[in-house]
Image: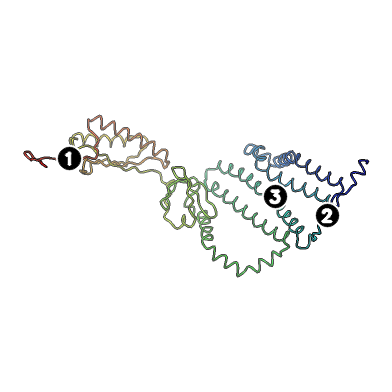
């Protein structure tokens, strides 16, 4: 049998030729999808050539590779499938009537629309990287906080468009009539999502009232750390033990908030306990020398106070209060360490000893203890 005649043979109402072309297109498309996606990324990158110092072509390709390849594969699959027909013996209902064909066609269209949405999301991430870099070059922190919020807002807007497009194009639903019919239902949904709305309004309050910005150290509701991101629902705070705490925005607005990042100094307050064997002269000299050390320290101000305060249960207690000239946590712990070392040196220099919890038991002479 000649090859031409063999290709004209039919299998399940499709010629061998069409079946081979179908698999050939799929194979070729699968092999070329990565090359085509690279070319498309190069074209997109060419448009934003001025931003090559911020984002490289490799970073753009890493963002867009998977969604572009998925989109191309779906397009190739659609083109190739047009070469084939559904076998009559399957007796399937047409695509405009409920059945397997309708389900498959609508599912494919939904996935195809989602692939476009996926590409748009990655482009938003690409623009976000560029804008965040430009914001980092400015002195104000407000744009550092606003840009991630705006990116999330755009993504939510795209998600709404995706849902409306699927309802309109895939399920042939009149979106306008549906929106009008949700009047009372919308009120019920709003009441049910009262907490979410409060958090959303809290995020806007944070942006307009500016109690803090990204990068500020805060203390709110017992959570102490650095603000990393302000979202629609919550604010992420990186604590000093490097964990992430998510605080609802309504709590950020309603609770008492201490912005540690705007205060010019950090206070240190502790007590030194010296043993009761310390003489009055030693106590006076140690107190005076620690005071001079704090006053002359390059990282503290003149508001420090060192005073012999009270007679403890097992120690003579000296109060030490001073202020570090920086709101930074790293500066605070470095200065505290340096001051502590100097205090140890001063105490040792004067021959005194640090106290530790102890109990003294006195026996009267001539007391006889027996079982």
Residue 280 picture quarter:
top left
Helix, strand or loop status at disc 3:
helix
> Which mark's residue is nearer the viewer, 2 or 1?
2
Q: Element type at marker 1?
A: loop
> On the rendered structure, is 79 left or right of 227?
right
The mark that comes first in sequence, 2 or 3, is: 2
Q: How many marks?
A: 3
Residue 239 location in percent, x, y? 45, 45
- Above or below, 116 against 359 in this view is below
Identify the residue at horizontal 10%, vertical 41% (top origin): 370
Give the position of the C terminus as an image quadrant.
Answer: top left
Q: Nearer the viewer, residue 48 or 119?
A: 119
* Labels 1, 3: front one: 1
Q: CA distance from mark 2 to mark 1?
A: 101 Å
Q: Residue at x 69, y 67 (%)?
A: 177
In the rendered image, which residue does mark 1 sit on? 360
Residue 287 placement (x, y as % from top left): 24, 37
x, y percent for residue 247? 48, 53
**Label 2, on which residue?**
87
Residue 118 point in image, percent of width and height? 67, 49
- For this rendering, which residue is in front, 49 or 129? 129
Task: Provide the secondary structure element on which disc 2 rests.
Answer: loop
């Amino acid at each position: 049998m000649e090859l031409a005649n063999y290709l004209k043979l039919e299998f399940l109402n499709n010629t061998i030729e069409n079946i081979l072309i179908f698999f050939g297109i799929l194979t070729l498309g699968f092999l070329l999808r990565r090359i085509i996606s690279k070319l498309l990324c190069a074209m997109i990158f060419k448009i934003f050539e001025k931003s090559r110092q911020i984002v490289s072509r490799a970073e753009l390709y890493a963002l867009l590779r998977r969604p572009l390849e998925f989109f191309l594969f779906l397009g190739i699959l659609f083109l190739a499938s047009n070469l084939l027909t559904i076998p009559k013996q399957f007796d399937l209902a047409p695509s405009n009537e409920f059945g397997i064909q309708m389900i498959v066609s609508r599912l494919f269209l939904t996935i195809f629309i989602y692939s476009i949405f996926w590409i748009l999301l990655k482009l938003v991430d690409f623009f976000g990287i560029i804008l965040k870099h430009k914001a980092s070059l400015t002195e104000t922190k407000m744009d550092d906080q606003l840009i991630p919020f705006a990116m999330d807002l755009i993504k939510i807007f795209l998600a709404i468009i995706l849902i409306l497009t699927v309802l309109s194009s895939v399920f042939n639903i009149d979106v306008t009539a549906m929106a009008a019919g949700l009047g009372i239902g919308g009120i019920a949904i709003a009441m049910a999502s009262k907490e979410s709305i409060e958090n959303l309004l809290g995020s806007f309050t944070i942006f307009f009232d500016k109690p803090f910005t990204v990068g500020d150290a805060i203390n709110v509701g017992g959570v102490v750390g650095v603000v990393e991101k302000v979202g629609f629902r919550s604010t992420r705070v990186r604590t000093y033990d490097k964990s992430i705490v998510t605080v609802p925005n309504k709590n950020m607005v309603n609770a008492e908030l201490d912005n540690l990042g705007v205060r010019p100094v950090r206070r240190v307050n502790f007590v030194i306990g010296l043993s009761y064997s310390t003489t009055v002269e030693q106590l006076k000299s140690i107190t005076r020398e620690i005071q001079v050390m704090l006053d002359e320290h390059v990282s503290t101000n003149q508001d420090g106070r060192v005073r012999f305060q009270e007679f403890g249960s097992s120690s003579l207690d000296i109060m030490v209060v001073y202020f570090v000239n920086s709101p930074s946590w790293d500066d605070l712990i470095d200065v505290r360490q340096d001051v502590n070392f100097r205090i140890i040196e001063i105490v040792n220099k004067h021959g005194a000893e640090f106290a530790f919890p102890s109990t003294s038991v006195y026996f009267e002479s001539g007391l006889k203890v027996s079982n």
